[in-house]
Amino acid sequence: MDLKKIFKTANPIIGVIHLLPLPTSPRWGGNLQAVIDRAEQEAAALSSGGVDGIIVENFFDAPFTKEAVDPAVVSAMSLVVQRLKHLVTLPIGVNVLRNDAQSAMAIATCVRAQFIRVNVLTGVMATDQGLIEGQAHQLLRYRRELGSDVSIFADVLVKHARPLGSPNLTTAVQETIERGLADGVILSGWATGSPPTLEDLELASAAAGGTPVFIGSGATWENIPKLIQAADGVIVSSSLKRRGRIEQPIDPIRVSQFAEAMHRGVADKSKSASAPLSMNSSIAVSP
């Protein structure tokens, strides 16, 4: 897929809004307006700081269910995303944790969001919620049934999980794209705030065959110039928050700092791609 059609850039920064606890979650505070207010503040901070897109997650609903979330969560997230659509002009995505891809697709389609994130699209992962099975067949058929054009960005060997079996990264990427029909793939480190290695990103990009590859965790203004050399875009949260602490709100100054570093990395990538081969790098031909 062409990322420019959604984000107006081939190398998007997608900032994450972690919603405060929603109805029925263990830490629900009983005030949906507080959830909306915080989300609107963070959307404004991300937009002013220079991101290219936003994704909304029910991150503070932990511990998560591994299957369908309560209807109250779907209702609340629909309302929040709809409010954000009226506040900012950026493309918006939805991630319903831990893996309720059909609810994410329903929300995104109804409020005209542009993409969703799916933690486990194919395969089986052992997680703190138990075994989670990818249900790509259901999701793709549901998207067709809805007449939706929402894009699906899927994690490969997702963080906070271990695969059942031992698929290598190349195979996992290829199957997520070729058999799961993901529109883009996401590569993370082992946990929230942990980045993927440059080597893994290079492997994933080679296996993806032109399908976009996103950095899904651990990106900072210090490492993004290097990591973006082997990826197409980045989904970022922790490092954009005050003092880099996950429970804090988004800091627009940190967003701007990250965006500047990302743009430097993209510029370096463009220079490398367009640089002519030196005489020493010519290919030898056997006589």
Image (cartoon, rainbow, N blue to C red):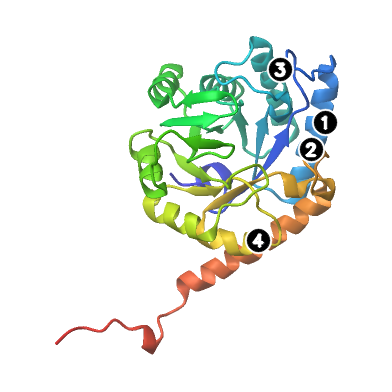
Nearer to the camera, 76 or 66: 66
Residue with the mark numbered 3: 76
User: Do residues under tags 2 and 1 come within 8 Å of each other at their CB atoms?
Assistant: yes
Element assignment for label 3 = helix
Mark 2 or mark 3: name the one nearer the start of the chain: 2
Q: Which mark is residue 38?
A: 1
Nearer to the camera, 192 or 130: 130
Mark 2 or mark 4: name the one nearer the start of the chain: 2
Residue with the mark numbered 2: 42
- Binning the other alpha carbons within 10 Å of mark 3 as few (below 14), some (14 to 19) or many (20 upward) gives some
Looking at the rendered structure, the kind of residue marked 4 is Asn
Disc 1 and disc 3: Cα gap in Å?
Answer: 14 Å
Disc 3 and disc 4: Cα gap in Å?
Answer: 35 Å
* Residue shown at 48% from the left, 31% from the top: 125
Quadrant housing the C terminus: bottom left
Percent x, y of residue 160: 59, 37
- The answer to whether 154 is drawn above or below residue 251 in the figure is above
